Image: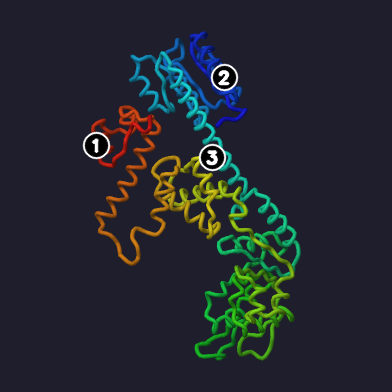
Amino acid sequence: MTTPQDTILIVDDQSVFAQGMARLLDKEFPGVRSAVATSGEQALELLAAQPVSLMLSDLRMPGMSGLELLGRALEAEPALSVVMITGYGSIESAVEALKAGAYDFLTKPVDRESLVRVVAKGLERARLLGENRRLRALVAQAGSLQNLLGRSQAMNRLRETIAAVAASDYTVLINGESGTGKEMVARTIHNSSPRAARHLVSVNCPAIPDHLLESELFGHVKGAFTGADRNRKGLFLAAHGGTLLLDEIGDIPMNVQTKLLRVLQEREVRPVGANESTPVDVRILASTNQNLEAKMQAGDFREDLFYRLNVLHIHVPPLRQRADDVPLLAHHFLTEACRDMGLPPKDIAPEVLAFLAARPWPGNVRELQNFMRRLAVFARTPTVDLALVRLADNNAGGPADADTGLPPYKDAKSKILDDFTRTYVRQLLAMTEGNISQAARISGLERVSLQKILRRLDIDAERYR
């Protein structure tokens, strides 16, 4: 795939050869512009003057050699894809160029079919690297709002709603499926509000036993119940002047709903066992993944409390409704996981991004984040490809089923090593188009050793030619 901005720079001291190659590539790749340089110095001037997607350079040139040009070009533009062109008698020099950072090499006389194939792959690599740079730049631009990443219409509307809601002091009900980022939305509301300098206190309602939730929210006095050996002010008073997030409010019991309604109406709390109430200044944000209207009809949620909470309403869209955001989120989570593990950042192949965007993600953003963490754990190459995605999928449930127990250590280790080796070798053969000798040189393996691996894993190199 190419874009109108793609430029191929052809460097060869034989002007006729370079111009002929340019005409051929212009015909084969209509959306690409070819530029010609007849020396390394001229090539560097062109590289400095305009963006270049792919450079094809002769290895042997008078003055600056192709190898020296390669080093200086990559120093100026590390992501540049470079293909070296050499005679049959200079294969060793071509291998040296590959080690120095060249993407691939061709031998003279250049075969038309080989040229087109190598150029197509080089342009695709350039496009992939450009897309990864663009996505990483978008992640960096997000700054403090990185947890609300997204450029889809749904996310743009969500940010606009948050900006409007944050300016007020009204109670907000945030609803959305599990894993969509409701808590992050609440934090963004607080951080964008006039109360941002004060505390945001969050309570996960289902995580607190029913008999303790009232005390946790409103506090208690010493001796109010068994174990109450001192006064406790509760989360409402702890959030005084700031914001209180009642996370998953649909799970609170009816008796606490009644007391919560009174606090919202009167703006004061009475600790358990106390005779007097204490005024409290707090903004309430509530979140839920449940249908509160249905719970009201079933008699499990107070109607008057619902309308007290639902003064302002924000719906957080599920990931399947903002599939355009998946590539950006995937890059962010993969970069984040690599950073946490002390690994260099990795790129994601275009077909993987398409696969991720088409996936339904019932667990939403949280599920995608966990999946990208698995990819970071299993990745052994600079680019995440579909083979690695399948490996991560196979390991999603752990090394063994719960009903059969763990397999023996030797078997588990052997399977993981075989999976890694198979993925690596397939990528190697795809890169070298089934050329076992070139694959052996790139991998550092002896040709015989690589052939043994292919036979053991039943991989046919011919399929990659």
- The secondary structure type at the circle numbered 3 is helix
Q: Quadrant of residue 3?
A: top right
| Relative height, residue 174 to residue 132 (above, below) | below
Residue 118 rendering spot, x and y as whole percentages: 46, 25
> Quick one: label 1 or label 3, which is nearer the N terminus?
3
Asked whether residue 105 appears in the rendered view, the answer is yes
Q: Quadrant of residue 429?
A: top left
Contact flag, marks 3 and 2 (Cβ < 8 Å):
no
Closer to us: 10 or 262: 10
Instruction: Give the crowd class for mark 2: few <14, some 14-19, many >=20 residues within 10 Å.
Output: some
Q: Point out which mark residue 452 bears.
A: 1
> Quick one: label 1 or label 2, which is nearer the N terminus?
2
Q: Amino acid at mark 1?
A: Lys
Q: Quadrant of the C terminus?
A: top left
Compute the Cα span from label 1 to label 3: 36 Å
Which residue was labeled with disc 2? 26
Residue 298 rendering spot, x and y as whole percentages: 63, 80
Compute the Cα span from label 3 to label 2: 26 Å
> Which mark's residue is nearer the viewer, 3 or 2?
2
